[in-house]
Image: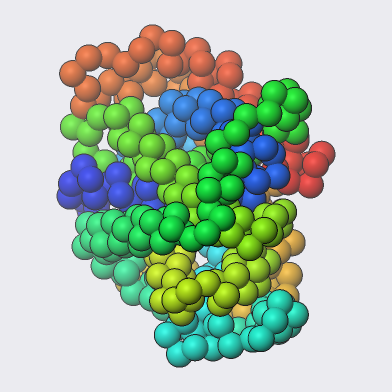
Amino acid sequence: MKKRESFTSRWGFILACIGSAVGMGNIWMFPTRVSLYGGGSFLIPYFIFVALISFTGVIGEMSFGRGTRSGPIDAFGLACESKGKRKAGETLGWIPVIGALAMAIGYTVVMGWIFRYMIGTFTGSTLAPEDIEGFGSRFGGMASSWGNNLWQLAALVICMFILMYGVGSGIEKANKIMMPVFFILFVILGIYVAFQPGAIDGYRYIFRVEPEVLAKPSTWIFALGQAFFSLSVAGNGTLIYGSYLPDSEDIPASAARVALFDTIAAMLAALVIIPAMATTGAQLDQGGPGLLFIYLPHLIKTMPGGRIIAIIFFVAVFLAGMTSLMNLYEAPIATVQEKTGLGRVPSCMIIAGIGIIVSLLIQGIVSDWMDVLSIYICPLGAGLAGIMFFWIFGKKYVEEQINKGREKPFTKYFYPICKYIYIPICFLVLILGIALGGIG
């Protein structure tokens, strides 16, 4: 059997995982949630849930992947093999794989928008509209059926070009460049915004705590959703990256670093966007594409040095989005390799072909497409992976995998917390998402 690819360094793996976690949720959703749910009143439960999910789900999925040295289908199959149900396990393993591919296809559409806006900051077209209606009209035309074909194809080609080079020479090297540059650019933006008149009001808002808002169930529900989806637990991307890890890697320590830098990225976005909105007296009450492609460009245009700020901002957003897109496509590509025996390049070409066709067809419905995936498939995939690892493989196997590469055994509370708290949380996220129309 061909030797499985692997990451070549600890920080290469960590940066790849940070890249998979840092994405649009950090940039266009986290600042909005902080704004809508009382600043520090939202941050308190958010930090609690980040700590819980990184301590359980992130560590679990990394360890599950490394222990089985495979993607979700074979990992689920191996878990069920001891019960004589390998085929059933493999069948369930298709859920997170198809979910990753579908999410990647939807993300491809969004990356086409980002790529067009990024290039437009250099040519001047991104900030060309005169008023908010002009920005909205321009985005509406782009985000319609067949409205952005060439740009999203170009974004997909860039992603696949990197993935064709494999894990060490492609994913790892790209993340070693993209992630540090992303953080540097957002720090620059944060410093710039800090010197704008009125920014202090934004900082006060971010860090104030309102007891009545903190006591509301909705604050905790949406903090849970934000933490859950930000850390990318879905039974696919984190699991597949874990499968490329050597046994010498200390997974709990790596998971802690991923959670830390993902949280730093989210906080940087909030520290840029909320104070920037405060300089104009505007309230941040709308997240998602509207914030990124309508309201923020309109705001940036009014700021001193707006064109330079737009370039820095959209280059940073493009880097964050591309690292997430690579992670989403990796699980289906690895599945094609495992199930067909094809090499890396033809496997990438097969998945790219599917991505091209479907992403072009869903341009007009991509918002609904992504909602269905985030509400139903992602938490279901995470819950199934948790059941396979913690319930079916069992305590002895789990503790063996967790403690590989560690000098001291990990806490004895890990297994019961994962089994009896984390897995029910996955299905709670599923139920709440269905009931509320999405919490991520």
State whether residue 354 is above or below residue 142.
above
When the figure is inspected, residue 349 is found, relative to residue 283, above or below; the finding is below
Q: Residue at x 60, y 84 (%)?
A: 148
Relative image position of residue 397 (x, y in whole percent): 37, 20
Q: How is the image coloured?
A: rainbow
Picture mark count: 0
Q: Residue at x 38, y 9 (%)?
A: 412
Where residue 284 sits in the image (x, y, percent)?
A: 67, 55
Specify the quadrant of the image occupied by residue 424: top right
In the rendered image, residue 226, in percent from the top left (x then y), is placed at: 60, 41
Q: Residue at x 44, y 54 (%)?
A: 194
Judge whether 40 appears above or below 363 on screen. Answer: above
Residue at figure coordinates x 30%, y 44% from the top left? 14
Would you say residue 335 is visible in this rendering?
no
**Is residue 391 shown left or right of residue 322?**
right
**Vertical arrangement, residue 387 with respect to residue 66, above or below:** above
Question: Residue 242 versus residue 136: which sits nearer the camera?
Answer: 136
Q: Left or right of 102: which side holds 122?
A: left
Give whichever of 19, 419 is nearer the camera. Answer: 19
Residue sticking out furthest to the top: 412
Q: Is residue 13 left or right of residue 323?
A: left
Say which quadrant the C terminus sits in: top right
Q: Is residue 237 left or right of residue 341?
A: right
What is the residue that sits farthest to the front in this orientation?
197
Q: Is residue 400 visible?
A: yes
Q: Residue 150: x percent and y percent?
A: 53, 87
Residue placed furthest toward the right:
435
